[in-house]
Image: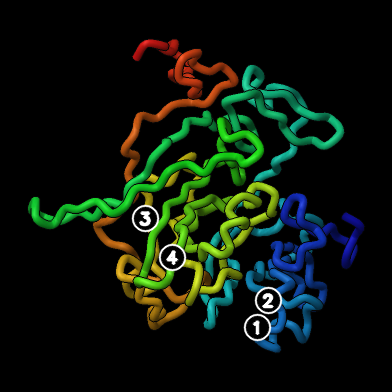
Amino acid sequence: TLPFNRRPRYYQHGLKDDPTAGMFYYCKDEQAWVFTIPAMKDNLPEATKRRCQHGWLLQSPVTEAASLEDAPLTGWNMWTGTIDTMDIQVECNECYRDSDCGLQNGRCNHKTRFCECNEGWSGWACDEEEVVCPQLAWIEYGTKSDDFYSDSSYSTLNNPANLSEYAFLYGRPAYWTWTNYSSSIDFYELIFYVGSRWVWAVWPTEEFDELYILESIPIHAYWHLDRGNKLIAFSEPTTSFYPTHINWYWTRVSASSGNSETVKGFDLFGANFLAENAKFECVAPVYQPTTDYAKESGLPLSTCGIAGVPNTTT
């Protein structure tokens, strides 16, 4: 973008004018690169806004680096209610040739400098093979058989414009199920990807239409969801194509019983606690969706990765 303090600003891709999108910029008075979310400005300490126009959630060590790529990667200050320190990683996600996009997996658009992935591949560099788990279950583990149980299952959310296709968010399938937390209130539970994590949330049935426009909404964060109403849990950072074998953090004391009391304590991602000995598991065969369909069933065929072919009988 146009220079700001004689340096570029970096916005979350495609969300420059969205106040809930992240932004890196150089704060001249602090002599540091900083990260902020403009919509959170009113909730930031005055000290972070006094010398930096938009305030900050992350602050680099003192530097005169001309770009974020040249800024120090270690020793950043992080505001979480108190000051902690952290390290960051910065990578350029622009492409310059087709080999930057996996060569056979996609092509580089030289106007936008972004990879355009072939069917079955996703990611900035088209290096993530799209394999779909069609059904998830929340599994809680114990030390003996009596401690093991499976909660309700979650199915893939289909594209309302074409029910034979999945609805994708950030190149990942979304999942849903119906549930009720009381005899009078029904909900849909959603599991979807927000760019760096998976989110588990509830949607009241009267807002059912929102389920079908998720794909058109630039959902890129989850902290703006109502924790007492919608947000159940969020995952650890991951690039997993479906949300299995990863850690989850509850934002309620007991999501399974519908207790909406928030947990005491706070960090960068809000009040939460680790869901111990419990994870999502895939409980149906995993496959890669294609444009070919079985003649009899009409269901997507598996491409069996890159090393096999689908058996249309089985």
Q: Residues within 10 Å of mark 1 (few under 14, many from 20)?
A: few
Q: Residues within 10 Å of mark 4 (few under 14, many from 20)?
A: some
Q: CA distance from mark 2 to mark 1?
A: 5 Å
Q: Residues within 10 Å of mark 3 (few under 14, many from 20)?
A: some
Sequence order check, earlier mark of 3 and 1: 1
Q: CA distance from mark 3 to mark 2?
A: 26 Å
Front label number (4 vs 1) = 4
Helix, strand or loop at label 3? It is loop
- Where does the image place residue 232, in percent across and percent down from the top left? 43, 66
Type of the residue with mark 2: Met
Q: Residue at x 73, y 63 (%)?
A: 23
Q: Which mark is residue 186?
A: 4
Q: Are marks 2 and 1 in contact (CB under 8 Å)?
A: yes
Q: Residue at x 44, y 56 (%)?
A: 236
Q: Which residue is mark 3?
A: 247
Q: Residue at x 64, y 56 (%)?
A: 219
